[in-house]
Amino acid sequence: MASVQTKTKPESGVLPDEKTILEFKESLRGELIQRSDKGYDEARKVYNAMIDRRPGLIARCADVADVITAVNFGRENNLLVSVRGGGHNAGGLGVCDNGLVIDLSRINYTRVDPAARTVRVGGGCTWNDADHATHAFGLATPGGTISTTGIGGLSLGGGVGHLTRKYGLTIDNILAVDMVLADGSFVTASDHENEDLFWAIRGGGGNFGIVTSFLFRAHPVHTDYAGPMLWELEDAPEVMKWYREYITTAPEEISGFFAFLNVPPAPGFPEHLHGKTMCGIIWCYAGDLDKAEEIFAPIRSFKKPALDLVGPMPHIALQTAFDALYPPGHQWYWKADFINELSDEAIVLHVKYGSALPSPQSTTHFYPINGAAHRVGNSDTPWAYRDATWAHVIVGVDPDPANNDQLINWAREYWDAVHPYSAGGAYINFIMEEGEDRIKATYRDNYERLAKIKSKYDPTNFFRVNQNIKPQTE
Ligand SMILES: Cc1cc2nc3c(=O)[nH]c(=O)nc-3n(C[C@H](O)[C@H](O)[C@H](O)COP(=O)(O)OP(=O)(O)OC[C@H]3O[C@@H](n4cnc5c(N)ncnc54)[C@H](O)[C@@H]3O)c2cc1C
């Protein structure tokens, strides 16, 4: 069987005695879940069923006070600690073996300020929590494309989605965060408070502390002109060549990620296409609706799609459109790269592997990260690939673990073939655990600055179940 790295580092300590654990449990307003508890197996599950870890304790925190208590308990008892937001991370970085999981899922409040066009969300919110809250005010913050994803992990790693070209990455829309640091202290970081920390959390992941609250900028977005447009596989080279030109010059109101996919047997998709491998673009135009038909006219006329489901839809409907296709509990294997340019040679390889998806839900996506995201410099935030055009991801997905070899082998072979045509690093949230060199390649010249800030805020590398940036002193 192809091996996959699902284990974190060995635990840094054994669990303390029962009395100490009981005192900890009683000091929490939320729950402490132990191995002997009925809900333990459910509580330790993460979105990717390929990950199977058995923490010693799971502290499901109800508020900031609980987070402070849990951090102090973990540190004082020398436990390996992982922090769980939405539990979606590809490599399962929200859960650890033997140590303590600090689970933020109960910290899921939202508060929209429609006048200031901001939304404050708890550190354990999913994107659905935020979208639901902002949509009522005709607002949205750029997030991801599946609404069950956690805001915590997605936002701290970058955040790529339908609104990236118009309003930037999610990190470009963070105004402030509240955090609990490794020593248990509570701080706020913004552009005028703890500025070094504020820089680091906008792409540096969960390395610097636990974000208990995000304050985001929100934008006027209510009804998009959006949906999938699909073409036959034999048209894929032509569509990809057209797309690579179009998306680099298109108005910023429009975004569209290119994909190879199998048509799902879902309402809206004609039965004769169910299960068929096709190529497509999932569009989102978030501009003036009166101009939508005009904007889409050249897209529709360049090559008539085999299926065109693009039309007006509430932004929240787009944000949740693919949730049912990807429920939690499937096996997922991820590989990724940033891409500057799609050469003719690379297109041949993408068509080859994109036409040979190993299971019905396996897919590959090219997310455009230009437009507004390009107007921020490579060192303005830790996200060091502002000059790249796409965040490319390859995902092997299937409910049945018996098919894991197929998923893993396909993804690895595909990635091996196309990696030489990539920009070098990869979006940190689209990779599993690939080691320090890959993390360094991704942060490029920003790595050293991140390591210095890590030394200041987390000198013992207490927060290390993440795409780890080692303190410079380590
Ligand atoms: C189906 C699916 C679709 C996706 N689509 C997109 C997409 O469209 N765009 C995109 O950008 N990404 C996307 N992703 C990737 C996603 O950004 C990452 O999986 C991300 O890590 C998920 O965050 P989480 O909070 O759910 O994960 P978790 O597994 O809970 O955590 C991931 C990491 O973040 C840390 N973390 C989480 N919350 C906090 C917090 N509040 N404070 C400090 N550290 C924290 C954890 O410690 C861990 O290291 C998708 C993932 C999946 C599974």
Image (cartoon, rainbow, N blue to C red):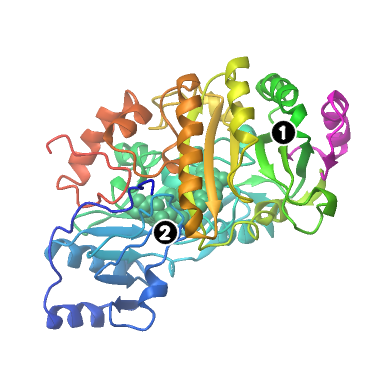
Name of the residue lying farthest toward the front:
1
Closer to us: 131 or 442: 442
Q: Position of residue 411 (x, y in %)?
A: 49, 39
Crowdedness of circle 2 by 10 Å Cα count: few (<14), some, many (20+)?
Answer: many
Question: Total label count?
Answer: 2
Front residue of 446 and 279:
279
Q: Mark yes or no: residue 178 visible.
A: no
Q: Is mark 2 within 8 Å of ligand 1?
A: yes
Residue at 59% across, 53% down: 146
* Residue beneath disc 1: 254
Instruction: Kindly identify the residue that appears in the image at 50 percent across and 46 percent down.
Output: 406
Query: Does the residue at mark 1 contact the one at mark 2 (Cβ under 8 Å)?
Result: no
Residue lying farthest to the top in this orientation: 344
For numbered disc 2, what is the local secondary structure?
loop
Q: Position of residue 359 (x, y in %)?
A: 60, 49
Type of residue at label 1?
Ile
Q: Quadrant of the C terminus?
A: top left
Quadrant housing residue 132: bottom right
Residue 85 image label: 2
Q: Which amino acid type corresponds to the residue marked 2 in the rendered image? A: Gly
* In-front residue for pair 128/338: 338
Q: Could you tell me residue 452's position as x and y percent?
A: 21, 34
Q: Is mark 1 within 8 Å of ligand 1?
A: no
- Residue 395 placement (x, y as % from top left): 53, 44
Magenta residues?
283-309
Residue in the image at 57% along x and 30% along y: 369
